Amino acid sequence: MKRTEAMTVGDIIDKLLREDNIDRQFDEQKAVYLWPEVVGQGINRYTTSRWVKNGVLYLHISSAPLRNELMMNRTLLIRHLNEAIGSEVIHDIVIR
């Protein structure tokens, strides 16, 4: 058996994730996980559910005034989420 260049376990996992295109799905789930950190606990308290599908973050907000405020600041939220993730994953937010 011929030895090749040694790789760390982290590098091997990253390579496998990229090959199966799972890294994109992983980053999308990271956006759901980071939502409370990005917006804070005050806004997260009114978030009843959140999920990501094909780069679109779907949110259910229980407060109508807060929903309108978030709609007006969607581009800022997208930028902050993508910065927290470390890549351009979220391209739109749908707030219901």
Image: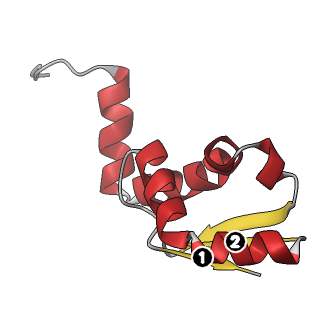
Is residue 91 shown above or below 79?
A: below
For image coordinates 57% across by 54% down, the residue present is 31
> Number of labelled discs?
2
Q: CA distance from mark 2 to mark 1?
A: 5 Å
Q: Quadrant of the N terminus?
A: top left
Q: Position of residue 16 (x, y in %)?
A: 35, 45
Looking at this view, is 1 or 57 the one in front?
57
Circle 2 crowding by C-alpha within 10 Å: few under 14, some 14–19, many from 20: few
The image quadrant that residue 37 belongs to is top right
Amino acid identity at mark 2:
Glu
Which of the 4 quarters of the picture holds residue 12? top left
Give the residue at x 72% y 44%. Answer: 40
Closest to the observer, 50 or 78: 78
- Three-letter amino acid code at disc 1? Met
Element under label 2? helix
The residue tagged 2 is: 69
Q: Which mark is residue 72?
A: 1
x%, y% of residue 38?
61, 46
In the picture, measured across the screen, residue 28 lies left or right of residue 16, that is: right
Q: Can you give x and y, in whole percent of width and height, for residue 80 in the image?
A: 48, 52
Q: 17 left or right of 1? A: right
In the image, 61: left or right of 34?
right
Crowding at mark 1 (Cα within 10 Å: few <14, some 14-19, many 20+)? few
Question: Residue at point 73% right, 71% down?
Answer: 59
Q: Is residue 60 visible?
A: no
Residue displayed at 57% across by 49% down:
30
Rendering coords of residue 79 (x, y %): 43, 58
The answer to whether residue 83 is above or below residue 93 is: above
Where, quadrant-wise, is the C terminus in this rendering? Answer: bottom right
Q: Nearer the viewer, residue 35 or 70?
A: 70
- Residue 11 in view: yes
Contact flag, marks 2 and 1 (Cβ < 8 Å): yes
